[in-house]
Amino acid sequence: MPNDPSNPEGALGGGRCLCGAVTYTTDAAPLWQAHCHCESCRRNCSAPFTSYFGMAEGHWRWTGAPPAIYASSPGVERSFCPRCGTPMAFRSAAFPGEMHFYAASLDDPTRYRPTLHVYWDEHLPWVHLDDGLPRK
């Protein structure tokens, strides 16, 4: 809604975990939206690839119970619901000032618009996508 101050132009809104305990909100458009094919993300979500969007610090906040945090590798933290285990977000020293949220956690995931595939060189050979997005 263009005139709704609670939903700025391009903002994806908020999201939650499966049980609803961990929630978040955003108040700006994401910095980027992409599908990640790296092995770490695949294993974290038990999925052939994951879909993320990056938010700048100060333009998102946790609004429910705080997530648990797992340091999955040096400089990398993965946030998840301590009750139901839903993966919620990713933070890396390689991307200072950003939090990366899983698109499937959005209250309205149909608003997500990926623009590229990252770590395509690690994609699973049985994943065949014909979406026309760049692959890096």
Image: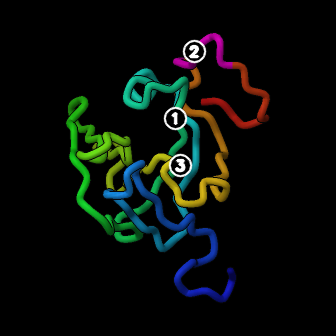
- Residue 83 higher or lower than 119, as above or below: below
**Residue type, mark 1 in image:** Thr
Quarter of the figure that contains the N terminus: bottom right
Q: Which residue is mark 2?
A: 124
> Residue at coordinates 32% horizontally, 52% vertically from top-left?
96
Q: Position of residue 7 (x, y in %)?
A: 57, 78
Q: Secondary structure at mark 2?
A: loop
Q: Which residue is mark 1?
A: 50
Residue 107 in the magenta stretch? The answer is no
Q: Residue furthest top?
A: 125
**Residue 133 lies in quadrant:** top right
Q: Which residue is mark 3?
A: 103
> Residue at coordinates 40% horizontally, 51% vertically from top-left?
17
Which is nearer the N-term, disc 1 or disc 2?
1
> Residue at coordinates 66% horizontally, 46% vertically from top-left?
115
Q: Nearer the viewer, residue 40 or 62?
A: 62
The magenta segment = 122-127
Residue 112 located left or right of residue 14: right
Q: CA distance from mark 1 to mark 2?
A: 12 Å
* Most frequent secondary structure within the magenta stretch: loop
Q: Position of residue 97 (x, y in %)?
A: 33, 58
Q: Secondary structure at mark 1?
A: strand
Q: Position of residue 25 (x, y in %)?
A: 43, 68
> Residue at coordinates 30% horizontally, 41% vertically from top-left?
78
